[in-house]
Image: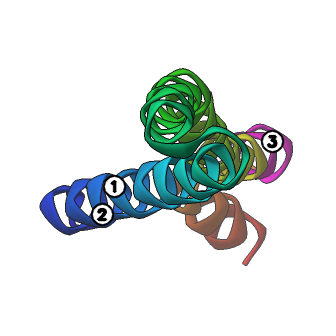
Amino acid sequence: MNWRRFFLHLLRNFALATGGAVLLLGTIGYLVAGREGMLNGATWGLMAGMISLPPMAILILTKYWSDFAGRYGAWYIKKETYGEEKEQTEQREKRD
């Protein structure tokens, strides 16, 4: 996994989602209360984006590391059940 590319994509997605929230809430605020409503809505959009996006990143990273842990767990169980490749070849040689 290319970590630099991953973090650049993550930051891009943060910026797009936060910008979308700012535009949406700013537009709603403008339609309801004019310029002051637009500023308040944009502020709320920025705060909502900054608060909600880091937990989303944690969920993404959790998904990645849980897959890694699952692969490692499967390998470890296989190793404990059947032994390592070296041990398996030694056992085959003893049988022959």
Q: How many marks?
A: 3
Give whichever of 69, 77 is nearer the camera. 69
Give whichever of 2, 44 is nearer the camera. 44
Disc 3 residue crowd, few under 14, some 14–19, many 20+, Cα 10 Å: few
> Magenta: predominant secondary structure element?
helix
Q: Where does label 1 land, which residue?
A: 15
**What span is colored magenta in the figure?**
76-82
Mark 2 or mark 3, earlier in chain:
2
User: Cβ–Cβ below 8 Å for labels 1 and 2?
Assistant: yes
Does dot 2 land on a helix, a strand or a loop? helix
Disc 2 residue crowd, few under 14, some 14–19, many 20+, Cα 10 Å: few
- Front label number (1 vs 2): 1
Q: Where does label 2 land, which residue?
A: 12
The percent position of residue 19, horizontal first and vertical second, equals 41, 56
The percent position of residue 77, horizontal first and vertical second, equals 80, 42
Residue at the extreme front of the image, as rendered: 34
Amino acid bearing label 3? Ile
> Where 1 sits versus 11, above or below?
below
Q: Is residue 35 left or right of residue 33?
A: left
Q: Which residue is depicted at the point 50% across and 29% down?
A: 54
Q: Is 78 one of the magenta-colored residues? A: yes
Q: Is 8 one of the magenta-colored residues? A: no
Q: Where does label 3 land, which residue?
A: 77
> Where 7 sits versus 89, above or below?
above
